[in-house]
Image (cartoon, rainbow, N blue to C red):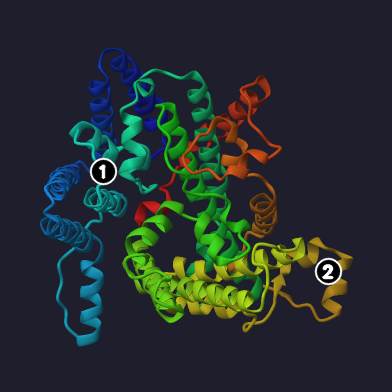
Amino acid sequence: MLFNSYAFIFFFLPATLLVFFQLGRVNARLAAGWLAAASLFFYGWWNPVYVALLAVSMLFNYRMGIAIARANAARAAWRGKRLLAIAVAANLALLGYYKYANFFLDTVNAALGSSASLGEIILPLGISFFTFTQIAYLADAYEGKAREYSFVHYGLFVTWFPHLIAGPILHHREMMPQFGLAETYRPDYGNIAAGLTIFVIGLFKKVIIADGVAAYVAPVFDAPQAGLTLTFLEAWCGALAYTFQLYFDFSGYSDMAVGLSLLFGIRLPINFHSPYKAANIIEFWRHWHMTLSRFLRDYLYFPLGGNRKGPARRYLNLMATMLLGGLWHGAGWTFVVWGGLHGVYLVINHAWRALRARLGHDLGRSTAWGRAAGCAVTFAAVVAAWVVFRADSLGTAGAILRAMAGLNGMVLPDVWLARWGGFGEWLAQHGVIFGATPALARTGVVHWIWILLAVVWLAPNTQQIMAATRPALGIPADSASSRWQWRPAAASAALVAGMALAVIANLNRHSEFLYFQF
């Protein structure tokens, strides 16, 4: 079931919310059980068969978590460590089979010229998210941080429908205390108003913006496979269109998850905080898919040694973490290369900061012009990496990147020659080439690009607008300084209602979220 569907908005959500608060008056555990059951129904709407897979995974990890915690309580650390290793290996084996088995088999077949096959393996939605969430729980149980033994609450923690399909990746210690609060099971009309507002903002981002700009992406990324040679403008328009499609698709989903959760009085961790405003790639990863970055840092980078064993080892750890982070996103060499690119970016960024520190520079200070330049360079690097991320093959990515570098020449759409009149003629006389740009048949993408650039660089994000309501966990302290602060008033209600009407009018073209496939 999609958040951006009539079934979810007009059936599932109101029914789930109404029954939850009615049951909350009677028994909190019963209300929590209802939410867990509703979340399983939500997941099963896509494919009921995989509800059993999710249930088995959940039961297994719950029991293993208890066994690990008890082993540690009995001072049998060796037994706890062994149980942790077994449980994590089982989770990774499940994820590996469904997500990576055919990828690795295809790689072996290509290398050896063989034709082995496991048949078609359908990837369960959200398997990366609920697997990583439970691995974090197991690690927390081993470290003594997870002490909740209620299966109802654990089931709700894993299946909680706002995060189940595309994140955020949750920590046991963040969610369990909230499930135990009596006020969670009573309606809070301030939370409901704020939650609906955030949900509608997220819907608007997805349905109107992300799906609107998506139409300009496929013609460019399909062109190399069709034998077309892209020009500079075509390639950059396609790359930037995808950059904004992914941004508003993912930030829209993140807003919807936060808003939906807040309706029920539960706060999710923030997962998205204006990453395109980042002045360097380190800052970008602190603001993009923040819970995944946290997971990779805490459960991969730090165990590998982090920065504790010298610069060379630190850079190696960064590369390993980002390569595996790329592979987490998808079973394909484009994802591995994308992760590797970001690993290289991070190594360069850390090395540059280390050099500046040795030269005595104050890394905490920067001028407005310096930050703007850093933002532009970081954004360009991120766009180039998104090309690899989106491309269907490394060959397609290479073709688009060559065009973006200007190696195929600069041609403006011939429709602009007539549209610009005398100015167009003057440009043509001075060497500007106008011609056919089949991958840019709809030149309206140029307006999408400059408008969305202004939005992502200049406008406050949802967390800053809604900061007064504390809608999520981990919102930076400076978010409340934004002048654009939401208040429950007639004007804001009218604006949100207008956005909701625009969304509802366009729900007939609803599409899946991009992060569903990861």
Q: Quadrant of residue 351?
A: bottom right
Instruction: Residue under label 2, please give it.
Output: 424
Q: Residues within 10 Å of mark 2 (few under 14, many from 20)?
A: some
Q: Note whether 467 is above or below 381 in the view shown.
A: above
What's the amino acid at mark 2?
Answer: Gly
For the C terminus, the quadrant is bottom left
The reply to whether discs 1 and 2 touch (Cβ–Cβ < 8 Å) is: no
In front here: 385 or 442? 385
Q: Check disc 1 and report its element: helix, strand or loop.
A: loop
Q: Is residue 103 left or right of residue 196?
A: left
| 6 sits left or right of 155 in the view | right
Q: Position of residue 400 (x, y in %)?
A: 54, 75
Q: Is residue 147 left or right of residue 231?
A: left
The residue lying at 28 percent from left, 28 percent from top is 35
**345 left or right of 116 in image:** right
Q: Residue furthest front?
A: 75
- Find disc 1 in the rendering and name its residue: 146
Does 190 sit above or below residue 442?
Answer: above
In this rendering, does residue 42 appear at all?
yes
Disc nearer the start of the sequence (1/2): 1
Quarter the N terminus occupies = top left
Image point 28% across, 46% down: which residue? 145
Give the residue at x 22% y 63%: 96
Instruction: Give the secondary structure at mark 2.
Output: helix
In the image, residue 402 lies at what x, y percent? 57, 81
**Image location (x, y in percent) of residue 432:** 79, 77
Coordinates of residue 74 in the picture (x, y in percent): 11, 47
Disc nearest the viewer among 1 and 2: 1
Q: Amino acid at mark 1?
A: Ala
Q: Quadrant of residue 485?
A: top right
Q: Residues within 10 Å of mark 1 (few under 14, many from 20)?
A: many
Q: CA distance from mark 1 to mark 2?
A: 67 Å
